[in-house]
Image: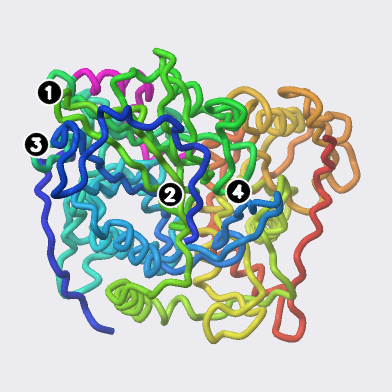
Amino acid sequence: MPAISQPHHRRRRTVRLLAAAAGLATAGALAAALPSSAAPAEAGKPGKLPSRYQDVQLLSFNDLHGNLEPPSGSSGRVTELQADGTSKTIDAGGVEYLATHLRDARAGNKYSITAAGGDMVGASPLISGLFHDEPTIEALNKLDLDVTSVGNHEFDEGAKELGRLQNGGCHPTAGCYTDEEFEGADFPYLAANVLNEKTNKPILKPYWVWKKDGIKVGFIGVTLEDTPGVVSAEGVKGLKFKDEVETINKYARVLQAQGVKSIVALIHEGGAPASGAYNYNCDSPGAGDGISGPIVDIAKNITPQVDALVTGHTHAAYACTINDPAGNPRTVTSAASFGRLYTDTTLTYDRWTGDIARTSVKSANHVVTRTVAKAPDMTELISRWNTLAAPIGNRAIGYISADIPNTGTESPMGDLIADAQLAYGKTLDPETDLALMNPGGVRAGLTYAQKGTEGDGVVTYAEGFTVQPFSNTVNLQDFTGAQLIQVLKEQVSGSNAASPKILQPSSGLTYTLDLTKTGADRIVVDSVKLNGTALDPTATYRVATNSFLAGGGDGITTLGQGTNDLVGTDDLAALEQYLTANSSATSPIAPPATNRITIVQ
């Protein structure tokens, strides 16, 4: 495929469309202050070296996933540690509030940059996903986003569609949704480590430089190297993904050669702090001691020429320091997901060297509370797109008796989806035995409380779309019992050993997961049973999965080796059929009991 990179021309415009604080300073901030001899002068007052140092504000967020409206349930809350050691939850998120918080944060800051760490789109709720995420790009333009890296979800619809989001144009099959052609992003998407297989060149700009009054700050954007393992094969066709560290180090040298000494890496890969609280001190007892995961090794190996890392992908919140290869602390941040937080980082620019005075870098996450005024332009945007989506989104597809969350190793929502796919599979082939659902495909739970005016307990199509937005198909394949055992082992071994991806099982499939062991030994083979009977290694079983898993996604390669394939309908349609057939206003469906996997810890 041809490269889709084009020169970026920043533009600001009003798109005419068809009418139809919570932030607590974290201990991730570097403690050291500027030396007294380097202190900047106050405006209009004499001071030592008044023109040398200039604070540059870096506002950042990540993993928005098209959540323009406030997310519901646990997806719309953050946890805050209190001074007495207790914690509380705070409702957070929604671009009406994010816009207000960002605009308030910028007030009085002449030198302010807003950057993002990828997954701005993809796996989006109906208001954005139904329109191929054009509403989210419009919202990001209004937020004055300056630059973002790509994430894995930017490739859900392939490189050509990503190019359209960057450069504009109507969707090739859905056409134009308004009386104006979609103009694309005002900001550059950076994809330094995503190469066209034929040309061996990045498909989008690898880096971008912010400039103001002689100050230059370079940004390098990469996504995780394992993107092909978490995106459908069609989405990454014709692309190759290079190592994050090698790529960032390469372009850091390029920027240095151009005289750009201040560099920030936007990395769609992340870590796992020891606490889920957004203001947890992950530098206690020492730099980076409270965080684990892929970003730790990445941060330790990226050249010291890079001054700060904005990360994402894990949907975690942290503002830490991790030592660079020279042993010097360097800030590493992530603002959770869904627009619930933003990070405010102060980069002190040294005009004499053109570099960041790293000892002065301070960073903290702030909550996007819903107690501030809504941004009117975002309210108008949401209303306009909701008007277009309403005829589809407001339709009732089922009834529930209580919240069905998507939390836990085995989640009620994951079980419900697996049961729906098993039931649908039996309509295609009565010999279907079981279904397996990937946990990453369960994007949200279902909440009992009404979201609009539909009434409590009513599940709308829009809510179902938020749970399963990928438009995967439900596929049937044959596997031997031995292969199914191997599938279960691959959840917790190989590429999934450090971060298991536990498949959600349909009713009747039971086994024990022993987390006190390591690798494939975590699966207690003798415990694996189907309807109370041990699997026969030589027998054939008919298995329903979505098309992502049927292609060997999530590192579970054996699922890509099934035979006698049969491709069915959209996975959301299967869920809708199941809810419609098994629930009513007078007999709502209850959350499944999560008792299929016995967990030993």
* Residues tagged 2 and 3 counted as in contact (Cβ below 8 A): no
At mark 2, the secondary structure is loop
Characterize the local packing of mark 3: few (<14), some (14-19) or many (20 or more) Cα atoms within 10 angstroms.
Answer: few
Residue 83 vs residue 179: left or right? right
CA–CA distance between discs 1 and 4? Answer: 39 Å
Inspect this view and state whether residue 3 appears.
Answer: no
The residue mark sitting in front, 2 or 1, is 1
- Say which quarter of the image contains residue 456: bottom right
- The residues tagged by marks 3 and 1 sit, at their Cα atoms, a distance apart of 12 Å
**Could you tell me which residue is drawn at 41 percent across and 19 percent down?**
328
- Quick one: quadrant of the N terminus? top left
Which residue is nearer to you in this view: 31 or 508? Answer: 31
Q: Residue at x 85, y 36 (%)?
A: 600
Residues marked 3 and 1 touching at CB (< 8 Å) = no
Residue in view at x 56 percent, y 29 percent: 293
Q: Are there few (<14), some (14-19), or many (20+) residues within 10 Å of tag 4? A: some
Q: Is residue 348 above or below residue 397?
A: above
Q: Amino acid at mark 4?
A: Ala
Helix, strand or loop at disc 1? loop
Q: Please say if 175 is above or below 311.
A: below
Going by the numbered disc 1, the residue's amino acid type is Gly
Dot placed on the residue nearer the N-terminal end, 2 or 4: 2
Please name the amino acid that badge 3 sits on: Gly
Residue designated by label 1: 259
Query: Bounds of the magenta span?
Result: 230-253
Q: Which residue is mark 4?
A: 277
Q: CA distance from mark 2 to mark 1?
A: 31 Å
* Residue that numbered label 2 is attached to: 63
Q: Residues within 10 Å of mark 2 (few under 14, many from 20)?
A: many
Task: Identify the element where label 4 is drawn.
Answer: loop
User: Between disc 2 and disc 3, whose residue precedes?
Assistant: 2
